[in-house]
Image (cartoon, grey):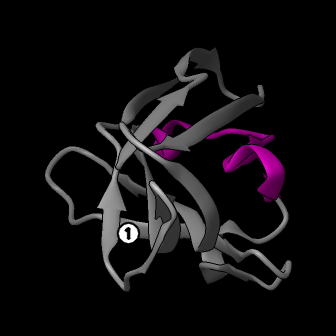
Amino acid sequence: VQLQASGGGLVQAGGSLRLSCAASVSSGNILRVDRMGWYRQAPGKERELVATMTDSGTTNYADSMWGRFTISRDNAKNMVYLQSSMLKPEDTAVYYCNAHGLTTQTMGILQVDGEDYWGKGTQVTVSS
């Protein structure tokens, strides 16, 4: 399973960014991803939740992320997005895409797992 994130970069405080992440497999097809989301890790800190979303649309945000971050998904494309606004310097971090619980089909064989998969991360830097 590969998770490819994009959209990070340098932005001034008060600005906005939209992160995108696509899930794919090297063989077969992804039929369903139970939960996709975003986590972030700032220098010297532990990785923390930003937001997750199930394929049925249920969202979970970290308390501190409400109002400035919006998660969305395109289930048909196995993609998850994170729209951020009013960014602050303390939002500077590497943002990681996560996928949990994949249903895949390869050569007619259906496979369901409860694994967590992570992308390599995309850097977001907010300047003051």
For the image, the number of numbered tags is 1
- In the rendered image, the residue lying farthest to the front is 108
Badge 1 element = strand
- The residues colored magenta run 71-92
- How packed mark 1 is, by other alpha carbons closer than 10 Å (few <14, some 14-19, many 20 or more), is some
Does the segment drawn in magenta span residue 67? no
Q: Is residue 30 visible?
A: yes
Q: Position of residue 56 (x, y in %)?
A: 84, 82
Question: Residue at the location (41% across, 30% down)?
Answer: 122
Q: Work out whether 100 lies above or below 80.
A: below
Residue nearest the viewer, comparing 103 with 93: 103
Question: Given the image, on which type of amino acid does mark 1 rest?
Answer: Glu
- In the rendered image, the residue lying farthest to the left is 44
Residue nearest the viewer, comparing 66 with 60: 60
Residue 66 in which image quadrant: bottom right
Q: Position of residue 120 (x, y in %)?
A: 29, 37
Q: Quick check: 9 left or right of 70?
A: left
Q: Quick check: 118 left or right of 56?
A: left
Residue denoted by label 1: 48
